[in-house]
Image (cartoon, grey):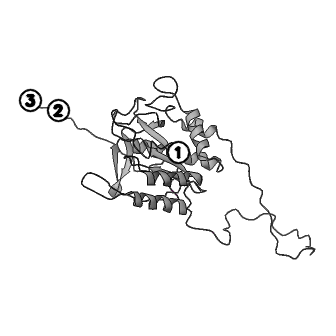
């Protein structure tokens, strides 16, 4: 009697929580698209409302994982956000090599992100063009999914999220950075891929998180002023038993609780 060996395929998944590229960032998730037969759909008005909401709630970075034709109203909304110091990041799109530039990624004020795989090759479906600023991992990414599950998936949306997280780390290190400064740092520190120099596939290259963060000088510490409620000129006895410092974990009298933002970093991740 002949017996056949049975091959069993197994997979192992960690039960720990996944950590994002900017774990201390606070996220404001804004749903600007609704389900439709051909995928998510929205209108200029709804997207503008979403941008206004992000701005009003202190967003420092806005991640835009959608792509389509140019829209003059959305363009104006993006320019208004950038004028307020908000870093705008967008997925290049997954329409492939023959696709024309898609927006908002093709907007000159937006950081357009293409996707790479584990071998540093361009994601086949990633859009190309002169507007591509930088690339980031976006193929077979292990991500959280609805209902407490996980999934492996690909797309430039995930590459854009990676760059948004990296931008949050830069702003955490120096909150005074302007959107064009964040863009310049990302491009200057990127690891060159493809043709030497900037190209239409990878932009300046693949993002290098360590190099980018290392290139940012920390913002100087702000002196803490001591405020006294005693009248001017009053002499205060020299009390040796009075504490010289205040506990760091002691909360202030009032603290705003709505400083969440898309990609907010403790400052939130753009103001």
| Relative to 98, residue 29 above or below | below
x, y percent for residue 269: 55, 53
> What residue sits 45% from the left and 25% below the top?
194
- Under circle 3, the secondary element is loop
Q: Residue at x 44, y 43 (%)?
A: 105
Q: Is residue 262 above or below residue 255?
A: above
**Where is residue 141, by image quadrant?**
top left
Q: Tell me the residue that label 1 is attached to.
A: 109
State yes or no: residue 174 in magenta: no
Residue picked out by circle 2: 5
Q: Which residues are magenta?
A: 255-261
Q: CA distance from mark 1 to mark 3?
A: 69 Å
Q: Marks 3 and 2: CB-CB under 8 Å? A: no
Q: Percent position (x, y) of residue 156?
A: 40, 41
The spot of residue 155 in percent (x, y) is 37, 41
SS under mark 2: loop
Question: Most prominent secondary structure in the magenta stretch?
Answer: loop
| 203 w.r.t. 271: above or below | above
- Which image quarter is the N terminus in? top left
């Amino acid at each position: 009697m002949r017996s056949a060996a049975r091959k069993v395929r197994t997979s192992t998944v960690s039960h720990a929580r996944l950590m994002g590229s900017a774990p201390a960032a606070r996220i404001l998730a804004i749903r600007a698209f609704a389900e439709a037969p051909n995928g998510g759909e929205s209108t200029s008005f709804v997207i503008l409302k979403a941008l206004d909401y992000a701005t009003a709630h202190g967003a420092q970075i806005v991640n835009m994982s959608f792509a389509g034709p140019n829209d003059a109203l959305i363009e104006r909304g993006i320019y208004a956000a950038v004028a307020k110091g908000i870093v705008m990041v967008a997925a290049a799109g997954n329409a492939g090599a023959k696709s024309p530039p898609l927006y908002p990624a093709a907007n000159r004020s937006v950081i357009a992100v293409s996707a790479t795989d584990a071998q540093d090759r361009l994601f086949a479906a990633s859009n190309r063009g002169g507007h591509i600023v930088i690339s980031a991992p976006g193929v077979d990414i292990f991500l959280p999914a609805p209902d407490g599950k996980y999934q492996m998936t690909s797309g430039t949306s995930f590459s854009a999220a990676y760059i948004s997280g990296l931008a949050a780390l830069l702003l955490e290190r120096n909150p005074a950075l302007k959107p064009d400064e964040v863009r310049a740092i990302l491009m200057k520190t990127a690891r060159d891929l493809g043709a030497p120099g900037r190209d239409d596939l990878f932009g300046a290259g693949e993002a290098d998180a360590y190099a980018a963060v290392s290139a940012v000088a920390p913002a100087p510490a702000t002196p803490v002023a001591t405020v006294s409620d005693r009248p001017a000129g009053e002499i205060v006895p020299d009390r040796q038993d009075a504490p010289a410092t205040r506990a760091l974990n002691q909360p202030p009298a009032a603290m705003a609780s709505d400083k969440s933002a898309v990609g907010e970093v403790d400052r939130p991740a753009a103001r």
